Image (cartoon, grey):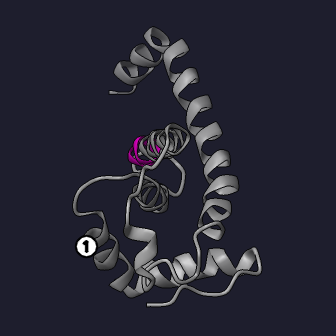
């Protein structure tokens, strides 16, 4: 059995090193950027309806919405990777979903924020940036 594992390791050594390096970089990036992004969400995001109305009045706003959704999609994908590698996968997925625009987003956000563990984790991150806790 050990010979088999060593044989696999020698065959795929370059790929294993690449995956471990990428995993470490994603872990560090998630530690740095996830709390920062959570701190940028307004404290009344879940209670104020103005944050949930998508109004595109000019082309610049469309670019912002598409860019924010693209960043959210990247965070969701990285969060899925971090579920299997070191990192804050679930929180990255949550922040990514907050950034994206899609039907049913408000209902999904409400369900997530009603979870006490998620609520406490998000507010803990906000506290690190001296931001007030979320309203619910």
Q: Residue at x 51, y 39 (%)?
A: 67
Q: Quadrant of the N terminus?
A: top left
User: Residue 64, how many percent across, how many down?
Assistant: 54, 44
Q: Nearer the viewer, residue 89 or 10?
A: 89
Left or right of 18 in this view: 126: right
Lateral position of residue 65 relative to residue 127, left or right: left
Q: Main secondary structure of the magenta part?
A: helix
Residue depicted at x 42% and y 50%: 56
Q: Residue at x 44, y 74 (%)?
A: 50
> Where does label 1 land, which residue?
107
Badge 1 density bin: few <14, some 14–19, many ≥20, Cα 10 Å = few
List x then y, in percent, for residue 93. Answer: 42, 55
Residue 39 figure quarter: bottom right
Region in magenta: 75-82
**Regarding mark 1 in the picture, which secondary structure is present there?**
helix
Instruction: Name the foreground residue: 66 vs 87.
Output: 66
**In front of the other: 13 or 24:** 24
Asked if the stretch drawn in magenta spans residue 131, the answer is no
Task: Say if 85 sits above or below 17 in the image.
Answer: below
Determine the image quadrant of residue 116: bottom left
Find residue 95 and report its horizontal and vertical position in percent: 48, 60
Q: Is residue 98 above or below residue 134?
A: above
Q: Identify the residue shown where x is 41% and y is 57%.
A: 55
With respect to residue 79, does 7 lie above or below?
A: above
């Amino acid at each position: 059995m050990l010979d088999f594992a060593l044989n696999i390791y020698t065959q795929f050594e370059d790929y294993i090193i690449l995956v471990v390096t990428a995993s470490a970089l994603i872990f560090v990036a998630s530690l740095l950027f996830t709390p920062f992004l959570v701190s940028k969400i307004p404290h009344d995001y879940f209670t104020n309806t103005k944050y949930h109305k998508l109004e595109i009045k000019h082309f610049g706003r469309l670019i912002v919405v598409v860019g924010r959704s693209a960043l959210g999609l990247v965070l969701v994908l990285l969060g899925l990777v971090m579920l299997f590698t070191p990192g804050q996968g679930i929180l990255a997925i949550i922040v990514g979903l907050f950034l994206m625009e899609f039907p049913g987003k408000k209902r999904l956000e409400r369900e997530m924020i009603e979870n006490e563990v998620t609520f406490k984790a998000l507010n803990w991150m906000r506290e690190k940036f001296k931001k007030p806790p979320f309203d619910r």
